[in-house]
């Protein structure tokens, strides 16, 4: 890796723009742009300023030689009357982001890395008060897989869960599968109160099939659990006869809601 590539990677790892780096060093944005494109090289004073800012040695910055001693975490201890702050940013980067970034403390403390943990966290794996990532955990989380008090994602689990494919929670909303105290889905819903194309639970409303203590279907079939008990082992053949296009696994799933 050449100098300009290392500088670009370090800057991206900090999540700052060329203009912000230029302000730190005391040069123009155009100068930083030329450094990163390899058109020019900073003088020794600017190299020292860059090394100090990024917390690396001049040898690493200029020649890419790692120090022999084991790298230590960057820990920031700020003692103020209003709180304590801890930050760790790994020097190893991936896709221009630190492999691990932890930033915790009072106020707006943002963590941005492949693995990010902070008050506000964004990354491939994100954990925080508010988090966004492929895999996200937090009081409020957004991700492909999201887990939290309020979770929004492809698959969501939380007190309030909104999932494109699936949602599980106190209140669950999904286009595919929803399960919770209150479950609303365009396709399958299981819960205390379930509303969907196929619904099963305490109070169930399904456009194709509803099974529940209280069951209602405007266009399809509705059965109470008492009726299911009367049908006994014949309930599955009965449902298959009434709904021949409904997959057997789906019928078994709905019946299992009363297991």
Image (cartoon, grey):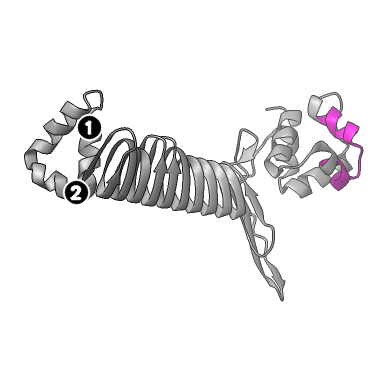
Position of 156 relative to 246 (above/below): below
At x 37% / y 34%, what residue is drawn?
A: 187
In the rendered image, residue 15, in percent from the top left (x then y), is placed at 71, 42
Q: Residue furthest left?
A: 233
Q: Is residue 126 visible?
A: no
| Residue 239 figure quarter | top left
**Disc on res. 50:** none
Q: Is residue 62 left or right of residue 145?
A: right
Q: Is residue 17 visible?
A: yes
**Disc on res. 225:** 2
Split into 4 quadrants, where in the image is the N terminus?
top right
Q: What is the crowding at mark 2: few (fewer than 14 residues within 10 Å), some, or many (at least 20)? A: some
| Residue 99 figure quarter | top right
Labels 2 and 1: the sequence-earlier one: 2
**Disc on res. 249:** 1
In the rendered image, residue 14, in percent from the top left (x then y), is placed at 71, 44
């Amino acid at each position: 890796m050449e100098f300009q590539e290392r500088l670009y990677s370090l800057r991206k790892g900090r999540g700052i723009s060329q203009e912000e780096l230029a302000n730190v060093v005391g040069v123009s944005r155009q100068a930083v742009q030329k450094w990163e494109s390899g058109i020019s090289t900073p003088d020794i004073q600017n190299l020292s300023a860059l090394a100090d800012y990024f917390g690396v040695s001049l040898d690493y910055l200029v020649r890419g030689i790692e120090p022999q001693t084991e790298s230590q975490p960057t820990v920031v201890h700020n003692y103020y009357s209003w709180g304590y702050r801890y930050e760790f940013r790994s020097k190893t980067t991936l896709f221009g982001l630190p492999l691990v970034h932890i930033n915790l403390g009072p106020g707006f403390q943002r963590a941005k890395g492949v693995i990010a943990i902070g008050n506000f966290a964004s990354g491939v794996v994100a954990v925080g008060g508010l988090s966004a990532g492929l895999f996200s955990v937090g009081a409020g989380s957004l991700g492909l897989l999201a887990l939290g008090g309020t979770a929004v994602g492809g698959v969501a689990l939380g007190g309030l869960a909104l999932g494109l494919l699936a949602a599980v929670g106190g209140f669950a909303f999904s286009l595919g599968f929803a399960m919770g105290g209150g479950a609303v889905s365009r396709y399958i819903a299981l819960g205390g109160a379930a509303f969907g194309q196929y619904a099963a639970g305490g109070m169930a409303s399904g456009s194709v099939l509803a099974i529940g203590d209280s069951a209602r279907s405007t266009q399809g079939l509705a059965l109470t659990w008492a009726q299911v008990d009367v049908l006994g082992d014949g309930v599955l053949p009965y449902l298959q006869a009434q709904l021949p296009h409904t997959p057997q696994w789906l019928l078994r799933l709905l019946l299992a809601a009363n297991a």
